[in-house]
Amino acid sequence: MKYLIKNAQIVNEGKTFTGSVLIHNQIIEKIYSQGETPESNADVVIDAEGKYLIPGMIDDQVHFREPGLTHKADIYTESRAAVAGGITSFMEMPNTIPNTLTQDLLEEKYQTAAKKALANYSFFMGVSNNNLEEVLKTNPRNVCGIKVFMGSSTGDMLVDDENTLSKL
């Protein structure tokens, strides 16, 4: 499906200009500056005259409270709020209940997000003094990072063992 958003005030790469954006199969295919003629074969045309079109933002430190604290919020409610505010991707911290300290718990989060998230997502693997083997099994392509708390922390996530830190 092709969408054309035309006549928008586009904010991109440090400048604002009037233009149009062609989106094909959920991917931005072309950005047209004012004076350029956009393709006319779009399935849906949106006239955005007088409106701003800005890139989505990435929130790299969220606390969505799932699992363990869903009486406060969960991946669905928090990602819905994020999307409403222009967030297109989020990276969730591991200090949930239980803390995300095993590959199984990490995988459960990905499975939950696949069903409930309204934005792109990734998760941090947490580190403790007691889960070094689990952390070393982590595929760096499957996480946004490894979270190490070296000061005060929640749960079992304080890492103050020099041996653990040196092996990381």
Image (cartoon, rainbow, N blue to C red):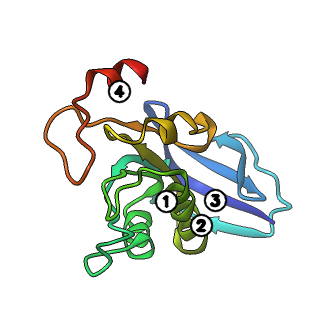
In the shown orientation, is residue 23 left or right of residue 55? right
Alpha-carbon span between mark 2 and mark 1: 10 Å
From the top left corner, tell me how far across and down residue 7 is, in percent.
Answer: 58, 55
Closer mark to the observer between disc 1 and disc 3 = 1
Q: Are marks 2 and 1 in contact (CB under 8 Å)?
A: no
In the shown orientation, is residue 111 left or right of residue 163? right
Q: Which residue, given by chain and number where applicable, does mark 1 sit on?
A: 105
Relative to 82, say whether 157 is above or below: above
Alpha-carbon span between mark 4 and mark 3: 52 Å
The residue shown at (37%, 40%) is 127
From the top left corner, tell me how far across and down residue 46 is, in percent.
Answer: 63, 67
Q: Which residue, given by chain and number where applicable, does mark 2 sit on?
A: 111
Residue 54 visible at all: no
In the shown orientation, is residue 74 left or right of residue 107? left
Element marked by disc 3: strand
Q: Nearer the viewer, residue 25 or 121?
A: 121
Q: Amino acid at mark 1?
A: Leu
Q: Are marks 2 and 4 in contact (CB under 8 Å)?
A: no
Q: Which residue, given by chain and number where applicable, does mark 4 sit on?
A: 164
The residue shown at (53%, 33%) is 136
Alpha-carbon span between mark 1 and mark 4: 21 Å
Q: Which residue, given by chain and number where applicable, does mark 3 sit on?
A: 5
Q: Are marks 2 and 3 in contact (CB under 8 Å)?
A: no
Of callouts 1 and 4, the N-terminal one: 1
Q: Amino acid at mark 4?
A: Thr
Residue 99 visible at all: yes
Q: Amino acid at mark 2?
A: Gln
Q: Nearer the viewer, residue 157 or 57?
A: 157
The residue shown at (39%, 63%) is 82
Of callouts 2 and 4, the N-terminal one: 2
Circle 3: is it few (<14), some (14-19), or many (20+) Cα within 10 Å?
A: many
